């Protein structure tokens, strides 16, 4: 028998989305092994081109447990000059995994902000210039200073929270039987194994009515 349990928690993970419009961006595929990201737009490298569109604060937790039960038995037999055996066993493996995410999505800000307001830094990307990015400290500092003035998008928060939650269970049951006999140089073995798996997955399906 065996039992194991594990969990992982990520509290208060903060992310920011910036949007830049009317930019000409593509890949130079002259070298098909290493395509290069490129842009003919002069504003592509300007941090003020990309406006803050959304801030997301989420906390997630996953938990997993597994239980294994097994029983095996073997009996030796003798038939005159022949020796044999009977062997059998059963095994069950019960596994469950679940995940829960709590998302807060903010899309209303006290003013218009761009990457330039978030301590911009260059992005290390081996396939070309990726453009500017907000620093992690800049985003965290902005959120801490302005949280009271941020507008929560309730619908997006509920949607993202519900769609990320899940629970999966997998139960596997197995049994086998074996028999063998040895007489001189002759050895015969036979066996049968049966396995049954039961899987159940639960999540959230959200249907958006575009008309209403």
Image (spheres, rainbow, N blue to C red):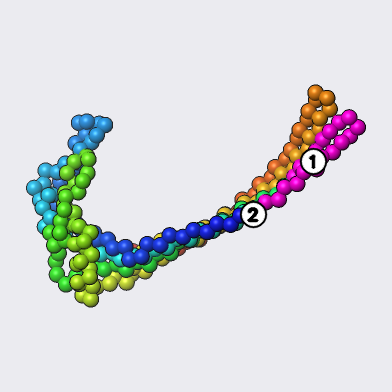
Left or right: residue 202 versus residue 196 is left
Quadrant of the rendered image containing residue 99: bottom left
Are there few (<14), some (14-19), or many (20+) residues within 10 Å of tag 2? few
Q: Earlier in the sequence, mark 2 or mark 1?
A: 2
Say which residue appears at 29% left-offset and 70% top-offset: 153
Name the spot of residue 154 as percent of width and height, x first.
Answer: 32, 72
For label 1, the residue is: 86
**Numbered circle sitting on residue 1:** 2
Name the spot of residue 158 as percent of width and height, x first.
Answer: 36, 69
* Residue 148 seen in the figure: yes
Magenta-highlighted residues? 69-88
Majority secondary structure of the magenta segment?
A: strand
Q: Gap between marks 2 and 1, in whole Å?
A: 23 Å
- In the picture as drawn, the residue positioned furthest to the top comes out as 185
- In the picture as drawn, the residue positioned furthest to the right comes out as 80
Looking at the picture, tell me which residue is in the foreground, 179 or 112. Answer: 179
Is 75 magenta? The answer is yes
Secondary structure under the numbered disc 2 in the rendered image: loop
Rendered-image quadrant of the C terminus: bottom left
- In the picture as drawn, the residue positioned furthest to the bottom comes out as 148
Left or right: residue 57 versus residue 82 is left
Looking at the picture, tell me which residue is in the foreground, 116 or 160. Answer: 116
Up the image or down, 27 lies above or below 63; here it is above
Up the image or down, 119 lies above or below 33; here it is below
Say which residue appears at 84% left-offset and 38% top-offset: 77
**Numbered circle sitting on residue 151:** none
């Amino acid at each position: 028998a065996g039992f194991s349990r594990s969990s992982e928690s990520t509290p208060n993970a903060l992310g920011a989305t910036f949007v830049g419009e009317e930019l000409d961006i593509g890949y130079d595929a002259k070298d098909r092994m290493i395509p290069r990201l490129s842009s003919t737009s002069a504003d592509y490298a300007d941090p003020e081109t990309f406006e803050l569109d959304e801030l997301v604060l989420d906390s997630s937790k996953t938990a997993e447990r597994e239980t294994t039960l097994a029983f095996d038995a073997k009996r030796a037999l003798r038939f005159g000059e022949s020796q044999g055996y009977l062997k059998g066993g059963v095994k069950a493996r019960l596994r469950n995994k679940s995940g829960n995410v709590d998302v807060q999505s903010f899309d209303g800000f006290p003013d218009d902000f761009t990457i330039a307001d978030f301590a911009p830094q260059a992005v290390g990307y081996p396939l070309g210039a990726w453009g500017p990015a907000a620093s992690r400290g800049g985003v965290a500092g902005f959120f801490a200073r302005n949280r009271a003035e941020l507008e929560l998008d309730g619908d997006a928060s509920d949607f993202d929270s519900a769609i990320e939650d899940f629970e999966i269970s997998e139960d596997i049951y197995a049994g086998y039987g074996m028999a063998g006999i040895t007489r001189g140089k002759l050895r015969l073995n036979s066996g049968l194994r049966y396995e049954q798996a039961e899987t159940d997955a639960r999540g959230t399906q959200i249907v958006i009515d575009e008309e209403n």
